[in-house]
Image (cartoon, rainbow, N blue to C red):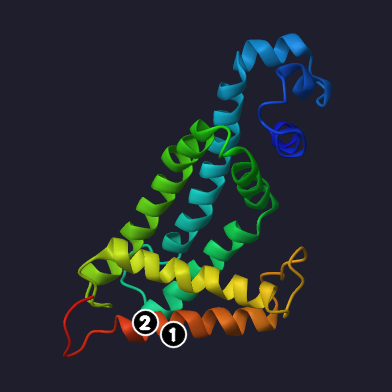
Amino acid sequence: MAAALELFVRQGYASTTLEDVAAATPVSRQTIYNHFGDKETLFLSVIDEHLSATLETLREATAHFPSELPDPEVYLNELARRIMATFLHPRTAALRLLLQTEGPRNPQLTQLWRQRVAAPVWSELIGQLARLAHGGALLIDDPARAAGHFVALVNGTVWEMTELGTFAVYHPPELDDPALDAALRSAVGLFVRGYAPGDRPAG
């Protein structure tokens, strides 16, 4: 899968053939054909693998609190770190680059990404925030909108620290970097204060 993704990014989806993928792997061309059949099936396998890894990473945050409602800030700090881990993963960067370059020419790739990765991951995030709201830890009446706010804060942290010079754009920070940890905690704190139960309308 890694070889296929690398070829898709380097050569473009349209220019990459199953023969190219076979040549870049230790298996025979016939094995590639027998297993995948066509290029779209191969691409689906690449993004399905990415989805499985991403959902596993996010769900591990839930596994840390299996039986009782967690402190929302502690829980969301862990979730933010796991979202950041997916953002910074080389596979995520490669897939995003592929979609940016190939999406306008091959809109079906963008559609596949939305259906097979973005929608399931979004659903997982909404479910995790809804759990906090249901238990009363946060005041949220629209978990989907809250998920958008949360992801925007986490993603904005990466943007600020790369585009504005804390880290080089092409050398993102390690997850245990103290500056990144402090920035994420600040973002999570802002989110929790914004959705804390109190005498205000739900958001």
Q: Position of residue 57 (x, y in %)?
A: 53, 55
Mark 1: which secondary structure? helix
Q: Are marks 1 and 2 in contact (CB under 8 Å)?
A: yes
Residue in view at x 72 percent, y 26 percent = 15
Quadrant assignment for the C terminus: bottom left
- In percent of width and height, residue 117 lies at 47, 43
Which residue is nearer to you in this view: 57 or 159? Answer: 159
* Residue topped by disc 2: 192
Tell me which amino acid carries mark 1. Gly
Name the side, left or right, on which 23 lies relative to 71. Answer: right
Q: Quadrant of residue 40?
A: top right
Residue type, label 2: Val
Return the residue found at the far bottom: 199
Taking the image as shown, residue 117 lies to the left or right of residue 94, namely left
| Residue 196 in picture, x, y percent from top left | 28, 84
Please name the residue shown 66% across and 52% down the image. Answer: 93
Q: Position of residue 2 (x, y in %)?
A: 72, 37
Q: Residues within 10 Å of mark 2 (few under 14, many from 20)?
A: some
The N terminus, quarter of image: top right
| Mark 1 Cα-neighbour bin, 10 Å: few <14, some 14–19, many ≥20 | some
Residue with the most extreme front position: 105
Check disc 2 and report its element: helix, strand or loop.
Answer: helix
Q: Nearer the viewer, residue 102 or 87?
A: 102
Above/below status of 169 relative to 167: above
**Label 1 to label 2: alpha-carbon separation:** 5 Å
Q: Residue tagged by mark 1?
A: 189
